[in-house]
């Protein structure tokens, strides 16, 4: 959906990739939003949403999906596209991708040494611990249905499009008031390559951390050596 919205001119469409890869510090604000909603710690106001998402023309995917109610209340005139999926297919796909990512031991290790992963992994885990009540395998389908009902109940019919990716450009463009592009509707989800891309990212993050430690260690050793030489010269 992000690729489709970008094709329609919504170039800055917020997606989980914004937080996980493109700007990991966003995860800190998402953590504040989770704390306000689920832990009763602090508040997350319209001004906070503007700070986090105000530069965007659209948003999709998680973690935004955990805040459907809050976002609809904050932006009551926004148009909402509710993307339908076969429930069993969606659940099986998520088990193989994002849920696998939550349980990925490499990501957990990277979160201790990598700047980006240290912000992303706790937010990812918080999403599943709260929105999916800590048990996605057994509760995911029921929460999916509950989430869709909540959105249908909150959004005025004129602002809501119930849509499936297989519908293509027509209904989406009609709803958004955009011209139909002269290109095929994008199909970007690649479940088969998801794990490989994640593993590559884990290892790059850990390699970067190792290089930083080596660099800082070298600088420290060099400084200690210089101090030692200076001390010996002074003592002599």
Image (tube, rainbow, N blue to C red):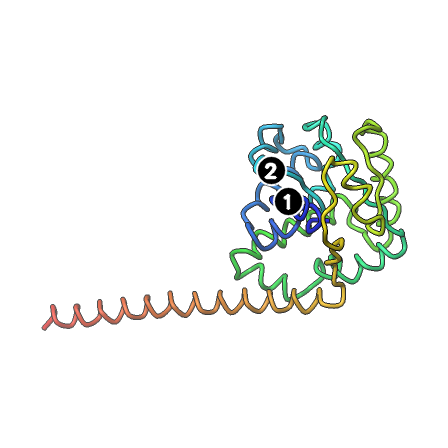
Tell me where residue 225 sits by quadrant: bottom left
The label number, if any, that marks residue 53 in the structure image: 2
Rendered residue at 63%/51% (across/down):
122
Tell me where residue 108 sits by quadrant: bottom right
Along the viewing direction, whichever of 34 and 8 lies nearer the viewer: 8
Along the viewing direction, whichever of 63 and 130 lies nearer the viewer: 63
Q: In screen coordinates, is 106 left or right of 66?
A: left
Residue at disc 1, secondary structure: strand
Residue 32 in the image: x percent, y percent?
A: 61, 38
From this view, report whether residue 110 is shown above or below residue 126. below
From this view, report whether residue 197 is shown above or below residue 177. below
Q: Quadrant of the C terminus?
A: bottom left
Residue 211 in the image: x percent, y percent?
A: 44, 69
Q: In screen coordinates, is 130 left or right of 205?
A: right
From this view, report whether residue 204 is shown above or below residue 19. below
Residue 212 in the image: x percent, y percent?
A: 43, 65
Residue indicated by mark 1:
14
Q: Are marks 1 and 2 in contact (CB under 8 Å)?
A: yes
């Amino acid at each position: 959906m992000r690729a489709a919205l970008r094709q329609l001119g919504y170039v800055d469409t917020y997606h989980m990739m914004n937080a996980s890869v493109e700007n990991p510090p966003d995860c800190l604000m998402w953590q504040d939003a989770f704390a306000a909603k689920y832990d009763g710690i602090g508040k997350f106001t319209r001004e906070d949403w503007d700070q986090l998402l105000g530069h965007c023309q659209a948003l999709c995917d998680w973690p935004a999906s955990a805040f459907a109610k809050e976002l609809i209340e904050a932006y009551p005139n926004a148009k909402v596209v509710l993307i339908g999926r076969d429930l069993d297919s969606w659940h099986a796909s998520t088990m193989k991708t994002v849920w696998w990512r939550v349980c990925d031991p490499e990501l957990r290790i990277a979160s201790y040494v990598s700047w980006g992963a240290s912000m992303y992994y706790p937010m990812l885990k918080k999403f599943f611990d709260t929105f999916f009540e800590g048990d996605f395998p057994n509760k995911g389908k029921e929460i999916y249905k509950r989430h869709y009902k909540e959105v249908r109940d909150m959004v005025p019919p004129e602002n809501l499009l119930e849509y499936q990716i297989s519908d293509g450009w027509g209904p989406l463009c009609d709803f958004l008031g955009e011209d139909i592009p002269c290109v095929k509707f994008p199909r970007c989800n690649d479940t088969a390559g998801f794990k490989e891309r994640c593993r590559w990212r884990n290892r790059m993050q850990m390699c970067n951390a190792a290089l930083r430690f080596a660099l800082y260690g070298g600088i420290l050793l060099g400084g200690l050596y210089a101090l030692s030489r200076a001390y010996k010269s002074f003592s002599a």
